[in-house]
Image (cartoon, helix red, strand yellow):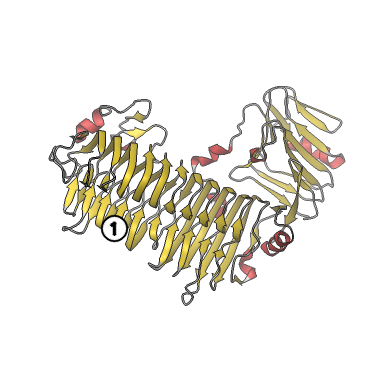
C-alpha cells in the first residue's frame, strides 16, 4: 500500500521527462543506439537500448550511456540488474528518470550525470527504485558521492558526523524491530541531502516525552527526496512540552520532494503538528500524505501536510483525517506563504476550535489552483476551503465539502478581511448552528470592516442556520467589491434574488441564477479560456480548465 501511494496523484507529471527524445533502457530490441568502447550513444531522437545487451556489456567492462542526436533524456522503463563490479554511467543532457526497479547486485557502481547541472532532473516515478546489495558500492550524482545506508540508526550516526553530507537509502527498511524512539530519529539538523532512491521506511514508531522537534528528522535544512515513510508518532499526555511534530520532520527549511507519508500522529499537546512536517519555511513539492492526526483541543496549528507554512507548498495532497487543532486545516493549519496545485480530501473536525478549513485553517498569502472535498466542522470561522483569511488571494480554486460552524460558515471561506477571491467556486453547504449570531454564505460567511473582493465566482450549496444567510456572502460590515458573482437560486435554498448578501438586499455585483441557467452556458463575465462547461463534468456546472474536478 505504501509503495502504491507515492505520486498516486497526477502530480507525477511535474517530475518531467517523457518517452519522446529519449534513450529508453527496456526489454525491447536495441534500436538507434551505437555502442563502442564502452560508450552507448543514440543515433536518432528516439532510441532503445535492450537491457540484456546492456547487462552483457556490464559483465565485461564499465558502460556509459549518453544522449545526443536529438535525444536529451535517459529513462529506465523495465527492471534491470547487474552483478559485476563494473560501473554504469547515465549521462543525459536534460534528465534521467527511473521508472522501474534497478538493482546493483554486486559491488558495481552507478553514476548519474545531468549535463545542464540540474540535480533535480534525476527523477523517480511510481514503481521506480534503485537498490544496492553492498553499501560499499559507489553511487554518484552530478559529482556528489553518496554514502549508502541500510537503516535509520546508521543514517542518524552518519549525519551527526557530517550534517552536510550526501546519503542514500540502499534498500527498503522495516523499522519495527528498532522499538520506540523517544525523540527524532535524526537529531542533528540535515544540511546535506538524503536520497531515498524510491525506497520505503515502514514501521517507524516515535513516542516522544517532550521533544522540541519530533519526526524522523528533527530539522531539515537541506534536501530529502524520493522516499516513502510509514510512521506512528505519539506524545506523552502528561507532558505539555511537545513542539513541532511531523511524520518526516519537526521543521523544514529546505526542500522536500517526491515523498509519500502514511500513519498516525496523536498528540494531546503541541504546536505545529503536520502529517509531513510540523512547520514549513522551505519548499514542499510532489508530496502525498495519508496521515491521520488526533489529540486534544490544545493542539495548536494542525494540518494534513504542515502545521504552519511560511514557505511554498506545491503539487501536494493530503487524504488523512484531522480531529484536532486550533487552527486546523486539511492541508495546513496556518499559512502565510504560497500553496498551489494542491488539494485535501480528508475530514477536518475540530468542533471547539476557531479557524477550521478544508485546505487551510488560518490563511494569508496565496492559494492558487487548489481544492478541498472533505467535510469541515468547527466552532467559528469554518470554510470548505479556508476557515479564516486575512490579506489572502484565492485564485482558480474550489471546495465541495460541507462546512458546519456554531458561528460563521462559508462554503469556500468562513470569514475574513482583505480577501480576494477570483475564478473560484463552492458546491458544498454552509451549515450554521447559532440562529442568533451565525453568518453563513454560499461563498463567504462574513467579511470584516477591512472588506474584500469577489470576482467571477459562484456557489450552489445551501447556507443556513445562522442569523444571516446569503446566496454568496452571509454578512458584510462594510462595502466589499463584488462582480460577476453568482449563486444557484434552486439548489441553495436562497430563492430570493435580492439575498445575495444576507444583511444587504440587492447587493451590487452579485446575482442569482436558476439551476438551468447555471448549466446552459457560462455566466456573464466568465472567461472561456479559464472556465469550461460540459454536461459530463462537475455535474454540468462550470469548472476550471486548469483545475478540473477529480471525478
Residue 510 located left or right of residue 235: left
Is 348 drawn above or below residue 497 in the view shown?
A: below
| Towards the viewer: 220 or 41 | 220
Instruction: Please give the residue where the numbered disc 1 appears in the rendered image.
Output: 380
Residue visible at 68% across and 51% down in the picture: 192
Q: Quadrant of residue 546?
A: top left
Residue 359 visible in image: no
| Towards the viewer: 330 or 29 | 330
Q: Quadrant of residue 493?
A: top left
Q: Residue 160, how many percent across, how many down?
A: 71, 62
Q: Residue 45, how many percent across, how many down?
A: 68, 23
Residue 185 located left or right of residue 86: left
Q: Residue 76, how many percent across, how many down?
A: 68, 38
Q: Quadrant of residue 31?
A: top right
Q: Locate the C terminus by quadrant.
A: top left
Residue 360 located left or right of residue 407: right
| Towards the viewer: 211 or 194 | 211
Amino acid at each position: 500500500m505504501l509503495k502504491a501511494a507515492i505520486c498516486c496523484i497526477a502530480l507525477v507529471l511535474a517530475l518531467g521527462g517523457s518517452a519522446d527524445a529519449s534513450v529508453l533502457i527496456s526489454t525491447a530490441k536495441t534500436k538507434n543506439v551505437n555502442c563502442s568502447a564502452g560508450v552507448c550513444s543514440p543515433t536518432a531522437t528516439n532510441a532503445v537500448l535492450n537491457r540484456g545487451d546492456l547487462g552483457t556489456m556490464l559483465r565485461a567492462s564499465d558502460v556509459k550511456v549518453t544522449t545526443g542526436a536529438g535525444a536529451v533524456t535517459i529513462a529506465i522503463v523495465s527492471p534491470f540488474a547487474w552483478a559485476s563490479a563494473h560501473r554504469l554511467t547515465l549521462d543525459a543532457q536534460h534528465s534521467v528518470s527511473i521508472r522501474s526497479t534497478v538493482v546493483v547486485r554486486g559491488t558495481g557502481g552507478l553514476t548519474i550525470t545531468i549535463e545542464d547541472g540540474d540535480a533535480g532532473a534525476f527523477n523517480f516515478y511510481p514503481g521506480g527504485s534503485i537498490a544496492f546489495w553492498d553499501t560499499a558500492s559507489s553511487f554518484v550524482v552530478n559529482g556528489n558521492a553518496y554514502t549508502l545506508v541500510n537503516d535509520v540508526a546508521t543514517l542518524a550516526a552518519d549525519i551527526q558526523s557530517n550534517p552536510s553530507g550526501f546519503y542514500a537509502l540502499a534498500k527498503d527498511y522495516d523499522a519495527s524491530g528498532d522499538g520506540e524512539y523517544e525523540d527524532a530519529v535524526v537529531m542533528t539538523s540535515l544540511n546535506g541531502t538524503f536520497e531515498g532512491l524510491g525506497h520505503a521506511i515502514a514501521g517507524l514508531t516515535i513516542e516522544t516525552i517532550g521533544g522540541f522537534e519530533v519526526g524522523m528528522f528533527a530539522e531539515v535544512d537541506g534536501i530529502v527526496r524520493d522516499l516513502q515513510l510509514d510512521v506512528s508518532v505519539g506524545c506523552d499526555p502528561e507532558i505539555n512540552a511537545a513542539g513541532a511534530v511531523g511524520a518526516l520532520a519537526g521543521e523544514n527549511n529546505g526542500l522536500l520532494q517526491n515523498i509519500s507519508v502514511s500513519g498516525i500522529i496523536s498528540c494531546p499537546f503541541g504546536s505545529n503538528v503536520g502529517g509531513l512536517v510540523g512547520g514549513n519555511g522551505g519548499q514542499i513539492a510532489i508530496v502525498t500524505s495519508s496521515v491521520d492526526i488526533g489529540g486534544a483541543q490544545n493542539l495548536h496549528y494542525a494540518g494534513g501536510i504542515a502545521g504552519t507554512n511560511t514557505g511554498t507548498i506545491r503539487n501536494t495532497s493530503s487524504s488523512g483525517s484531522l480531529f484536532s487543532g486550533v487552527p486546523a486545516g486539511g492541508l495546513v493549519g496556518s499559512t502565510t506563504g504560497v500553496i498551489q496545485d494542491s488539494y485535501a480530501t480528508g475530514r477536518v473536525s475540530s468542533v471547539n476550535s476557531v479557524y477550521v478549513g478544508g485546505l487551510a485553517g488560518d490563511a494569508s498569502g496565496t492559494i492558487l489552483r487548489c481544492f478541498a472535498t472533505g467535510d469541515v466542522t468547527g466552532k467559528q470561522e469554518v470554510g470548505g476551503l479556508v476557515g479564516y483569511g486575512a490579506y489572502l488571494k484565492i485564485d482558480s480554486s474550489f471546495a465541495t465539502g460541507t462546512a458546519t460552524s456554531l458561528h460563521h460558515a462559508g462554503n469556500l471561506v468562513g470569514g475574513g478581511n482583505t480577501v480576494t477571491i477570483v475564478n473560484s467556486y463552492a458546491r458544498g453547504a454552509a451549515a450554521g448552528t447559532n440562529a442568533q449570531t451565525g453568518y453563513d454564505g454560499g461563498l463567504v460567511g462574513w467579511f470584516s470592516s477591512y472588506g474584500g473582493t469577489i470576482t467571477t465566482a459562484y456557489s450552489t450549496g445551501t447556507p443556513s442556520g445562522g442569523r444571516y444567510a446569503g446566496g454568496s456572502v452571509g454578512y458584510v460590515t462594510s462595502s466589499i467589491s463584488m462582480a460577476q458573482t453568482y449563486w444557484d437560486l434552486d439548489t441553495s435554498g436562497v430563492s430570493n434574488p435580492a439575498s445575495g448578501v444576507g444583511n444587504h438586499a440587492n447587493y451590487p455585483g452579485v446575482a442569482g441564477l436558476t439551476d438551468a441557467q447555471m448549466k446552459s452556458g457560462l455566466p456573464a463575465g466568465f472567461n472561456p479560456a479559464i472556465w469550461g462547461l460540459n454536461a459530463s463534468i462537475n455535474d454540468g456546472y462550470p469548472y476550471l480548465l486548469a483545475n478540473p474536478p477529480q471525478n
